[in-house]
C-alpha cells in the first residue's frame, strides 16, 4: 500500500552545507524512516550540525514489506543504506544506535552507544504493532513492521507448505495450510491478496503432487468494512475483489486469544491455523513511552500546532510518534504525514534560529491507495477515485518513482515484470535452517 508517500527528494551536492563548526547548534534526529530521513536531508541546508540516529544502517520502504513477506521481492530491493543517501551533506552525521530515552530537562539523548547533547531534537522513531493488550496474540502472531519480520513471515509461509507436503494427519495439514490475517486496513488487504496469489499461481509448481485446494487465506476484520479511510465505493470494490480472488473475508469478527493451535474469536468460534499475521493496529514506537511528556491515543506524543512538545520548544515530534491533530482528530499514521511533518519541523527550526515566529503544521492530503493483487487496486486522489487495472497502474508507477536508489527501482521493476508475465516469484527461500519456520507456542491468555 502506498498512501501517496514519496521518498524525500535527493539533494544535489551544491545544496550541501559547509563542514560544520563546533559552535553551530546541534540537531539530533531520531529515526531514519520517511520523516527522519527527510528531516535530516532538509537540515543539511541549514547552519547546524546534524546527527541522525537509527538502530539500522538502512532506510526501509515499508509499503513494500508485504511483498518481501510473500516472496515477491528481496529485502535489499526495498531497503537502502543511509550513509550513501547523506553522502553529500557534510554537516550531517549518521550513527547506528538504539535510543532508549530522552532527558528533556538536560537536553540529552540516551543511546546504546552513549549520551548525546542537543540544542534541537526531532523525534521520528515511527511506530510499532498495537496488540491492544492481547498478550497471547502478541506472543504468537507475526508482525510486518520491518525487514526482519517480513523475512520471518516468509519463512513461516514457505515452511508451512514444506511441512504440509509430508504431513499425514489431515487435521494438522489443514492447520498448516490455513493463514489468518487480522486487520482489514491497507497492510492486511495487500498481504492477504498477495498471499492468495502466491498460493494459487506459484506454489502449485513447487508442490505438483500436493492438493493445495484446501489452503485458506482468512482475513478477519472487527468492523463492518475494509480500508476504513477510503470512500465507500472503493471499500466495497476491495472487498469484492478479495473475495473473488479466494480470500475468506470475515467482517464484524474480533479476535480474543491465540494458543498455538487455534485463534479464538470473541463471541465464540475458533480457527485452527498455524500462522496468524497481525495487521490490526499500530501505536507510537516504544521510545514515546520512555519520554516524560503527555501522550494521546495510540501512545503518540501530544504536540503543539507547530509540532513542538508542550513546554519544550526545542523538541519536535513528527510522523507516527506525533499526535498532531486536524479538525479535532489525530492525523493518520501515513508516510506522507511524516514527510510533510519533517518539512514543517525543519522550517520551524530555521525560523527559530533566525528569531522568526513559528508556523503551524498544515497537512495536505495527497491521496491514498492500496493494491489488492494482480491488476487490482483502489486509489483515492482528491476528488478522483479509481479501481481495477487503472488504479493498479497508478500504484505501480508511484511505488517505482518513490523508491530510494536507482538500483532499487530497476530491480523492483524487473521483478514485477517477471512476476507478472511468468506467474512466478523467484525469492522462495527459507532462511535460518529447517526450524526457522516453526510456529511458537504462545501461553494461554488468562480470561
Image: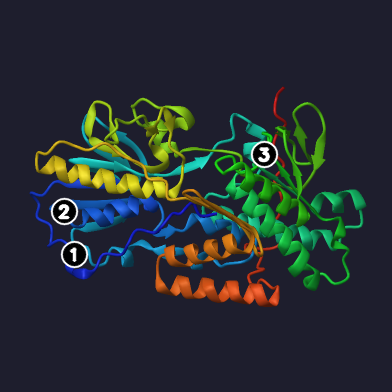
Q: Which mark is residue 225?
A: 3
N-terminal label among 3 and 1:
1
N-terminal label among 2 and 1:
1
Q: Residue at x 78, y 46 (%)?
A: 273
Q: Residue furthest front?
A: 383
Label 1 neighbour load within 10 Å: few <14, some 14-19, many 20+: few
Residue 355 at x, y = what percent?
Answer: 9, 39
Foreground residue among 309 and 366: 366
N-terminal label among 3 and 2:
2
Q: Examine the rendering and report whether any part of residue 142 can be seen.
A: no
Asked if residue 105 lies left or right of residue 411, the reply is left
Asked if residue 239 lies left or right of residue 268, the reply is left
Residue pointed to by mark 2: 46
Residue 271 at x, y = what percent?
Answer: 80, 40
Label 3 neighbour load within 10 Å: few <14, some 14-19, many 20+: some
Q: Is residue 257 above or below residue 177?
A: above
Q: Residue at x 55, y 36 (%)?
A: 130
SS category of the residue bearing label 1:
helix
Residue 444 at x, y = what percent?
Answer: 72, 31
Q: Is residue 298 above or below residue 20?
A: above
SS category of the residue bearing label 2:
loop
Q: Which mark is residue 15?
A: 1
Q: Examine the rendering and report whether any part of residue 74 can be seen.
A: yes
Label 2 neighbour load within 10 Å: few <14, some 14-19, many 20+: many
Residue 242 at x, y = what percent?
Answer: 72, 52
Q: Residue at x 43, y 27 (%)?
A: 296
Asked if residue 157 lies left or right of residue 53, the reply is right
Distance in Å between CA atoms under marks 3 and 1: 47 Å
Q: Residue furthest top?
A: 447
Amino acid at each position: 500500500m502506498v498512501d501517496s508517500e514519496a521518498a524525500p527528494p535527493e539533494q544535489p551536492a551544491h545544496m550541501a552545507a559547509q563542514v560544520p563548526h563546533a559552535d553551530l547548534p546541534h540537531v539530533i534526529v531520531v529515526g531514519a524512516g520517511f520523516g527522519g530521513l527527510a528531516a535530516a536531508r532538509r537540515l543539511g541546508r541549514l547552519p547546524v550540525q546534524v546527527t541522525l540516529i537509527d538502530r539500522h544502517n538502512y532506510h526501509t520502504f515499508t509499503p513494500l514489506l508485504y511483498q518481501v513477506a510473500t516472496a515477491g521481492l528481496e529485502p535489499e530491493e526495498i531497503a537502502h543504506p543511509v550513509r550513501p543517501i547523506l553522502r553529500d551533506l557534510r554537516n550531517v552525521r549518521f550513527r547506528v544506535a538504539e535510543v532508549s530515552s530522552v532527558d528533556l530537562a538536560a537536553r540529552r539523548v540516551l543511546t546504546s552507544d552513549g549520551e548525546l547533547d542537543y540544542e534541537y531534537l526531532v523525534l521520528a522513531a515511527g511506530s510499532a504493532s498495537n496488540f491492544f493488550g492481547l498478550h497471547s496474540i502478541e506472543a504468537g502472531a507475526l508482525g510486518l513492521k520491518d525487514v526482519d519480520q517480513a523475512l520471518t513471515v516468509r519463512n513461516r509461509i514457505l515452511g508451512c507448505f514444506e511441512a504440509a507436503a509430508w504431513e499425514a494427519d489431515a487435521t494438522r495439514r489443514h492447520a498448516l495450510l490455513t493463514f489468518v490475517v487480522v486487520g482489514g486496513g491497507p497492510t492486511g488487504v495487500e498481504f492477504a491478496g498477495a498471499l492468495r496469489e502466491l498460493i494459487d499461481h506459484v506454489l502449485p509448481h513447487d508442490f505438483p503432487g500436493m492438493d493445495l485446494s484446501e489452503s485458506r487465506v482468512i482475513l478477519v476484520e472487527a468492523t463492518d468494512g475494509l480500508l476504513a479511510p477510503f470512500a465507500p465505493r472503493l471499500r466495497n470494490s476491495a472487498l469484492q475483489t478479495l473475495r473473488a480472488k479466494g480470500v475468506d473475508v470475515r467482517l464484524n469478527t474480533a479476535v480474543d486469544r491465540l494458543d498455538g493451535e487455534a485463534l479464538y474469536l470473541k463471541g465464540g468460534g475458533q480457527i485452527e491455523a498455524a500462522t496468524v499475521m497481525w495487521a490490526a493496529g499500530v501505536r507510537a514506537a516504544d521510545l514515546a513511552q520512555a519520554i516524560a511528556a503527555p501522550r494521546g491515543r495510540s501512545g503518540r506524543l501530544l504536540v503543539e500546532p507547530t509540532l513542538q512538545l508542550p513546554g519544550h520548544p526545542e523538541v519536535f515530534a513528527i510522523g507516527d510518534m506525533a499526535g498532531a491533530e486536524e479538525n479535532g482528530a489525530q492525523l493518520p499514521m501515513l508516510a506522507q504525514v511524516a514527510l510533510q511533518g519533517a518539512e514543517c519541523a525543519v522550517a520551524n527550526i530555521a525560523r527559530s534560529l533566525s528569531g522568526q515566529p513559528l508556523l503551524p503544521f498544515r497537512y495536505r492530503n495527497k491521496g491514498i491507495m492500496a493494491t489488492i493483487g494482480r491488476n487490482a487496486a483502489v486509489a483515492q486522489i482528491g476528488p478522483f477515485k479509481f479501481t481495477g487495472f487503472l488504479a493498479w497502474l497508478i500504484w505501480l508507477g508511484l511505488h517505482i518513482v518513490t523508491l530510494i536508489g536507482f538500483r532499487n527501482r530497476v530491480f523492483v521493476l524487473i521483478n514485477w515484470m517477471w512476476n507478472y508475465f511468468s506467474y512466478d516469484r523467484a525469492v522462495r527461500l527459507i532462511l535460518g535452517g529447517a526450524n526457522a519456520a516453526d510456529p511458537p507456542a504462545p501461553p494461554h491468555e488468562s480470561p
